Amino acid sequence: MKVLFDHHLPFALAHGGLQGQIEQTMAALVRRGVEAEPIRWWDATQRGDIIHFFGRPDRTYIDLAHAKGMKVVVAELHSALGSRSGAARFAQKSMMRLTQALVPSAFTAKLAWDAYEKADAFIANTTWEAHIIETMFDADPAKIHVVTNGIENVFFCPHVGGTHLVCTAAIHPRKRVVELAEAAASAKVPLWIVGRPYAESDTYYRRFLEVQKANARWIRYEGAIGDRAQLARIYSEARGFVLLSTQETLSFSALEAAAAGCPLLLSDLPWARSAFGEHASYLPLALSTPEAARRIRTFYEQAPTAPPGFKPLTWDEVAVLFVSVYEKMAL
């Protein structure tokens, strides 16, 4: 069995959890004895049995793969869609149906909605995402497989605890690090934010630096940390982990913190509850800064006595699940 991995956005153009997901999945499959490699778009001689596509390929892509005798697995992240309200999703589904009925297919082909009809299997990171794929795109439930993200072994370490909370996230409006910093400072809760912006010229990043500088007693920021062992120690020595983002599919940071035994405080969104259930605390996004500060303070005070939390899978365990999906496709 040979699996080819593809994605439409070069890693050099944007950083984030998806890059780690692709790289770690390939590496774990290779350790398990599966031949896996990225698609070489310039190599007309490259062959494979399965294309594992991260994103949504169009109908031509899938048809050409099938013509070459290759199956296609679609692993698309639905961070925004999965975070919308039920009413918003209903309106979007209605618009999709209306567009498909009235607009010529040549114009809708680029939207690639029919990928969920043509592809051979679909990967969802959570049961909530599986629900989104089935209800929004009418995908065959038999083709949907829930495979969570794995976590590197270095993060499975004893939790020591400490006096500060930690948040690891890109400095971006979607991650709401400015709002989190303001609430933590208001609550007089020490918070260490680890991450970097997509561009240092970004106005949200400059606003974050202003908030951090004005509240340096409570908010610590030194940029991103690339050393995985050091990051694992930071989780281990933190009192708890906080992520109040508006959109996620399944946060790598939250999984890493959970592996290190950190109590979790997450946005009260379906992705989080479907992934962590009772093993996390939740905070609604619509709260005012004073109310958010009060809830963060409560979490901070209760974190040392929190029961043992959620333990994620390792990448090697995730590879076993993927091999099972691939083998079912070969039947």
Image (cartoon, rainbow, N blue to C red):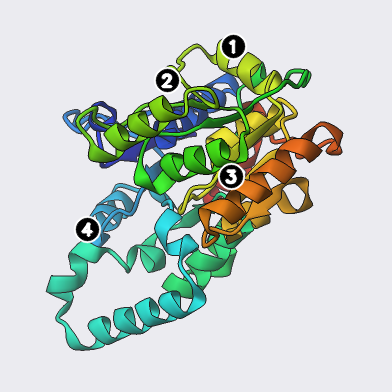
Q: Nearer the viewer, residue 71 or 214?
A: 214
Q: How far across and how far down the image is residue 222, in percent?
A: 43, 17
**Snapshot quadrant of residue 79:** bottom left
**Residue where numbered disc 3 is placed:** 327
Q: Nearer the viewer, mark 2 or mark 1?
A: 2
Tell me whether circle 2 and circle 3 mark residues in contact (CB < 8 Å).
no
Relative image position of residue 7 (x, y in whole percent): 31, 40
Residue drawn 65% across the image and 30% down it: 257
Q: Which residue is mark 4?
A: 60
Real-space CA distance between mark 2 and mark 3, rounded to the nearest whole angstrom:
39 Å
Which residue is tagged 2? 224
Q: Which residue is mark 1?
A: 229
Neighbour class for label 3 at 10 Å: few (<14), some, many (≥20)? few
Eyeballing the image, is 102 above or below 39? below
Secondary-structure class at tag 1: helix
**Kind of residue indicated by mark 3:** Glu
CA neighbours of label 4 inside 10 A, class few (<14), some (14 to 19), many (20+) = few
